Image (spheres, rainbow, N blue to C red):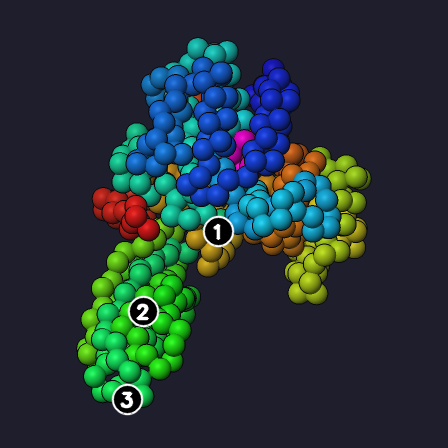
Amino acid sequence: MTDTEFAFKAFDEIKDEILALHKDIYLHPELSHEETRSAAVIEKKLEEHGFLVKRGVSGEATAFIAEYGSGKPVVAYLGEYDALPGLSQVGGCPEKKPMEPGAPGHGCGHSALGTAALTAAFIAARWLDETKASGTIRYYGCCAEESRGVKPFMARDGYFDDVDVVYAWHPSDHNGVVNMTMAAIKSVKISYKGITAHAGATPFLGRSALDAAEIAHVGINYLREHVVPEARMQYSYLDAADKAPNVIPDHCMTQEVVRAPKMAQVLPIMDRLKKCAEGAALMTGTTCTIEDDTGFYEVIQNSVACRILSDAAQDIGAPKWSEEDKKLAAAFSRNFSEEQKERQAQEAKAIAGRTGGSAGDLIAGPLDPEMEAFDPEKTSYTGGASDVGDVAMVAPTASLSVATAALGTPLHTWMFAGQTGSSIGEKGLACAGEIMGLAGIRTLENPKLLDGAQEERLAYTGGKPYVCQQSQTA
């Protein structure tokens, strides 16, 4: 039996319990930091399969780490299971129909993400049992990815220090191991304190905290010209002072966000942004307090680990879509805006160009039929961010995308949630689990495949120690 056949067989033996677990988590969506039930059912399943589970790691009640085997190499899988607010959706229904109006839903596919990573861990653990080989499998229960995350705290606390490779994935509208980087991001909360007064009779006695925030944003907006072109600065008012315009407001709070391709670019921009706030406070006779908030490093792909993952992906192949799957994807696509339909058409054209297929057929049945191979020379960048970047700073990390939705389906929508809870989502998670499981098997069987992975990571980081940019009280 080949290792690929072993992965297929191992999944077939656990398929029913994995899909039942995915459905259970999908039907009981929980927000970040509230995933008590979701974490518990995954922890229970891990223990049933012989994993030792450490709960409540890094100060987060719904975070955990599970381990199987012993010795080197250490192969890690990242599981997420939190949902998003307001995206409740009946699985497989191509019309907006919440299971419970206003309730959370898995619009980022995390019910599939966590269970596919679990699948991979179980496949690799079965291979260890079969061969009696040396090696350790770890499943990281990563709560709250949609808010402040836990991976930065796990990295801070040294939980990845002995890990040889991390295999991760995310539900998507396409398949493959792509050499894509994601942005680094950091945010702060700025509180301005002034003096209240009657805005008509004695405004000269007041010092407006709202004026300070407004003036700070004038400076920040001028700053945009003098940063790297890829940088993004956004802000929101968390407390826009009192609602009465005849009162000089003595309080105001904003959240300021900086994104850029690298944390080394983000931090100096953030320092300059803070000076805008401090200068505005000085100009208005107010004071400001700046508090660290969120902070994720850029997500990078480790080319050595990516080749292992990509080879496994080519051997497993893309999900095997049925005609019913394609019809369902097309039904969801009918809800797209014109802009989303155009994006779908562009994606179909690109896939057809690579495969020699028909773009028209792909639009009629809009599910990615191929598994794109890793190409280190073909790079791309997105301004999105993830706390997987913090893991990549401390351990060689490779990430995979597998389709769980129609081409062009935007994440964080009821449409993505509905497809996650359908046969499309089930086939996607099964494929991802088999690929990552096979990559784990090959790493355990031949650790020399990882030669150069740590050196590549150290070259990128310059060997500097990891510094957590995340606030645990954010």
| Residue 456 left/right relative to 107 | left
Residue at image mark 3: 201
Mark 2 or mark 3: name the one nearer the start of the chain.
3
* Residue 113 part of the magenta-drawn span: yes
Q: Is residue 141 magenta?
A: no
Q: Camera-side residue: 452 or 140?
A: 140
Residue 210, relative to residue 388: is it above or below?
below
- Indicate the secondary structure of the residue bearing disc 2: strand
- Residue at point 46% right, 59% down? 383
Q: Which residue is labeled 2 in the image?
A: 252
Asked whether the viewer can see residue 214, the reply is yes
How packed is label 1: few (under 14 Cα within 10 Å), some, or many (20 or more)? some
**Sequence-first disc among 1 and 2:** 1
Query: Which residue is more in the foreground, 287 or 150?
Result: 287
Q: Residue at x 31, y 55 (%)?
A: 293
**Magenta residue span:** 111-116
